[in-house]
Amino acid sequence: MRWQLGGDWPVGPCLVPVGTVLSGVARDGELVEAPKWNEAPLPMPMPLNAVALDEDAALMMLKWYEPEHWHRILFGPNIDRELIKGRKAALDHEERRRKTERAGKRG
């Protein structure tokens, strides 16, 4: 997963400068290792001004932020916004199905 900051990002006593490209490690569509700055893991989620540079990063931004903020999320030039929103909707549907299935087994 890769993002590029669209503005400075104050993190504790540090400032990650605008334009910085940050990479995290993904596994099964989840972020398993946060991006680092000066060898320290950064807090997640990424700021809204971070441009998602790949599809996994774009999907992660949609997972982190509520739909009312999605219009502010920026995707790289080769990322299909509607495709990523569709993947997020499919994941949400699957999660609701699993919850319903688990609730049925308990009841």
Image: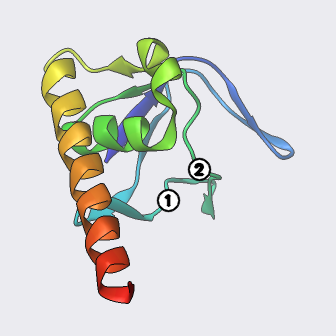
In which quarter of the view is residue 74 placed?
Answer: top left
User: Which tag, 2 or 1, sits closer to the chain's start?
Assistant: 1
- In the image, residue 14 sits, relative to residue 18, either above or below, namely below
Q: Secondary structure at mark 2?
A: loop
Using the rendered image of the protein, determine whether residue 62 is visible from the camera's viewpoint.
Answer: yes
What residue appears at the point 52 percent right and 20 percent down from the top-left corner? 69
- For badge 2, the amino acid type reads Met
Residue ranking furthest to the front: 107
Badge 1 density bin: few <14, some 14–19, many ≥20, Cα 10 Å: some
What residue appears at the point 34 percent right and 68 percent down from the top-left corner? 99
Q: Nearer the viewer, residue 76 or 28?
A: 28
Using the rendered image of the protein, determine whether residue 29 is visible from the camera's viewpoint.
Answer: no
Is 79 on the left or on the right of 16, as rendered? left
Residues marked 2 and 1 touching at CB (< 8 Å): yes
In which quarter of the view is residue 100 placed?
Answer: bottom left
- For badge 1, the amino acid type reads Ala
What residue appears at the point 39 percent right and 35 percent down from the top-left corner? 62
> In the image, which disc is placed on residue 75?
none
Q: Nearer the viewer, mark 2 or mark 1?
A: 2
> In the image, which disc is placed on residue 44?
2
Is 69 on the left or on the right of 85, as rendered? right
Instruction: Estimate the x, y position of residue 65 in percent, counting from the top left.
Output: 51, 35
Distance, label 2 to label 1, CA atoms, is 7 Å
Q: Secondary structure at mark 1?
A: loop
Q: Which residue is mark 1?
A: 34
Badge 2 density bin: few <14, some 14–19, many ≥20, Cα 10 Å: few
**Quick one: quadrant of the C terminus?**
bottom left
